[in-house]
Image (cartoon, helix red, strand yellow):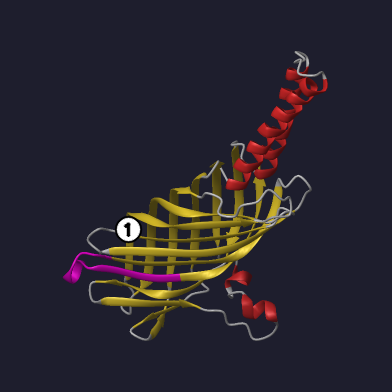
Amino acid sequence: MPLRCVALLASAAVVGAVVAAAPARASGGGADPAAAPDAAARAAMVEGACTRSCGCARRVEVALTLPVWVPSLTGTFASGDTEVDASRQPRGVGGLFEKLLPDAATSLEFAFMGRVEVAWGPWRAYADGFYVSLDETVDWKLRDEDTTGSLDGTVLRAFVAWQPDVLYGCSPCAPRLAVGPLFGARWFRLDLEAQRADGSQLAQDESWLDPIVGVKADLTFANGASVAVLADYGGSFDGDHTSWTLSAELAWPLDHRGRWSLRAGWSILDLDYEVGSGADEYDVNLHLTGPMLGVTYRF
């Protein structure tokens, strides 16, 4: 509980005691039995108001978000002695919109995401995932020669975070900052294919799980707008695979109750996966980054 809230709740108790004692002083020391319930009621009202305004009361909040992510891509994947380079960079030639968004925006190749967050006091339970399919908008190269390929990937993440308020104050206009550590896991499934020079297919389908640690911060303003930053890092204990993410989002309320909000931001995912050796070696190194746009509903 914020220290300011503790102070106000203590003040509420003092107010209740003073109100209860006032009738006794007015009657020359005789206590008025009817005054005690009234004083208790007044103190309870003050306490309730302080609790609501400070956000001290704990209640479960659920937020569902449906965002769309349009990432650019750089990286390589190899099987044995064959390595394929993949790249999809912004190549806008005119207009600010084309410079900001990858060419995939016109080819309908993007990552669809889903997210749910449950909050209770300082605790957060968070789960999200996305599916990405990249094909025509990626430049695939095999030994510096153009080729064809495809990438289908699914990433699921779940974690628990502890985010106590670090700003004190009960003013309705004071922003609230909640920041703290997170612990969880991220699951990958990647299906990669590329055409070899002899016409054969280089194909690999792998899945793995990474434990993750990180930090999550949410800054909420009086009008309901908020800024969220999340960073995490994960990998295997033997170092064969690592991954990290970084995202920043701005949410703007769409109704006076704050149930609907529009979200926009930027998200980065980097992964490095290596398994096997020699002719059986499989290595993936991918970096995805791009804008995100979505809508959130709270209940």
Is 271 drawn above or below residue 1 in the view shown? below
Q: Quadrant of residue 173?
A: bottom right
Name of the residue lying farthest toward the right: 26
- Residue at 38%, 51% (x, y): give it: 185
Residue 286 in view here: yes
Name of the residue lying farthest toward the top: 33
Circle 1 Cα neighbour tier, 10 Å, few/some/many (<14 / 14–19 / ≥20): some
Is 125 drawn above or below residue 45 in the view shown? below
Q: Quadrant of residue 102?
A: bottom right
State yes or no: residue 119 in magenta. no
Pick the residue in front: 3 or 111: 3
Pick the residue in front: 163 or 251: 163
Residue highlighted by disc 1: 206
Q: Position of residue 69 (x, y in %)?
A: 57, 63
State yes or no: residue 286 in magenta. yes
Taking 2 as reference, is 23 left or right? right
Taking 42 as reference, is 163 left or right? left
Tell how many labels: 1
Q: Position of residue 187 (x, y in %)?
A: 38, 53
Q: Position of residue 118 (x, y in %)?
A: 55, 42
Q: State which region is magenta.
A: 274-287
Disc 1 on helix, strand or loop? Answer: strand
**Image quadrant in which the C terminus is located:** top right
Residue 292 in view here: no
Taking 272 as reference, is 1 left or right? right
Taking 57 as reference, is 53 left or right? right
Amino acid at circle 1: Glu
- Residue at 68%, 48% (x, y): give it: 170
Q: Position of residue 253 (x, y in %)?
A: 73, 53
Q: Quadrant of residue 194?
A: bottom left
